[in-house]
Amino acid sequence: MKGSEHMEPEVNQTGQRERPPEEDRQEAQSLGVEESCRRLSGYLESILDNAGEAGLDVECLAPPCRELGKALRGFQALAEELVSYSTQLSKGDLSQAVPESGSGLYSGLKNLHANLKHLTWQAKQVTKGDYAQQVSHLGEFSEAFNVMTRQLKEREAQLKAEKESIAKQADILHSYNELLLELTRKQREWIIIVDV
């Protein structure tokens, strides 16, 4: 079966498998396990520092380390996506889609994204005068938001009371003005008698 593509490796006189020449070349060009481990460690550190700039030639690693190198490439892609998503979220971009990745690394950001979307809706309700909106899921921010809505409600009630008071004063002034005008008109009819 020497003519077929998938040849079984031949066994030499010592009982060891003989490898095709391309495997020998590939392994000759690969690093030792110790150096491969150093490179993998450096690669992981560079992913954590700046995932977008990290790089690794997996094929130059020792054969036992290549699978780990490939897994770290997958981790790098996840880290790049996580950085992009969190950066957009930190800028207030709530229109972006939540990543589909099943990674647990996203759970906190997904919750934050959902909370911010709901908070945005609540803030819009407050702008429409619905001061009953309360936030309970964002720690210190919740307390500040709730105090703000309570103060807005109190201030609106105070302004309404002031407006009503001013309207009453305006009505009183208007009636006094009408009375003065009536008195002025009738004054012409009055006869003033002065005793000399």
Image (cartoon, rainbow, N blue to C red):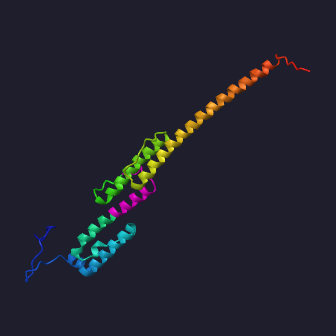
Q: Residue at x 34, y 73 (%)?
A: 45
| Most distant residue in the front direction | 196
What secondary structure characterizes most of the magenta part? helix
Q: As displayed, is residue 155 above or below residue 196?
A: below
The x and y percentages for residue 61 are 27, 76
Can residue 180 be seen in this snapshot? yes
Instruction: Name the quadrant of the C terminus.
Output: top right
Relative height, residue 84 to residue 53 (above, below): above
Q: Is residue 73 above or below residue 125?
A: below
Measuring 25% from the left and 81% from the top, which residue is drawn there?
34
Q: Is residue 195 left or right of residue 15?
A: right
The answer to which quarter of the image holds residue 75 is bottom left
Residue 1 is covered by the magenta coloring: no
Highlighted magenta segment, given as a residue range: 78-97
Q: Nearer the viewer, residue 148 or 11?
A: 148
What's the residue at 62%, 34% (across, down)?
166
Indicate left or right for 137 with 149 as reference.
left
Residue at horizontal 45%, vertical 53%?
Answer: 92
Residue 70 image-quadrant placement? bottom left
Query: Is 83 covered by the magenta stretch?
Result: yes
Residue 174: x and y in percent read: 68, 27
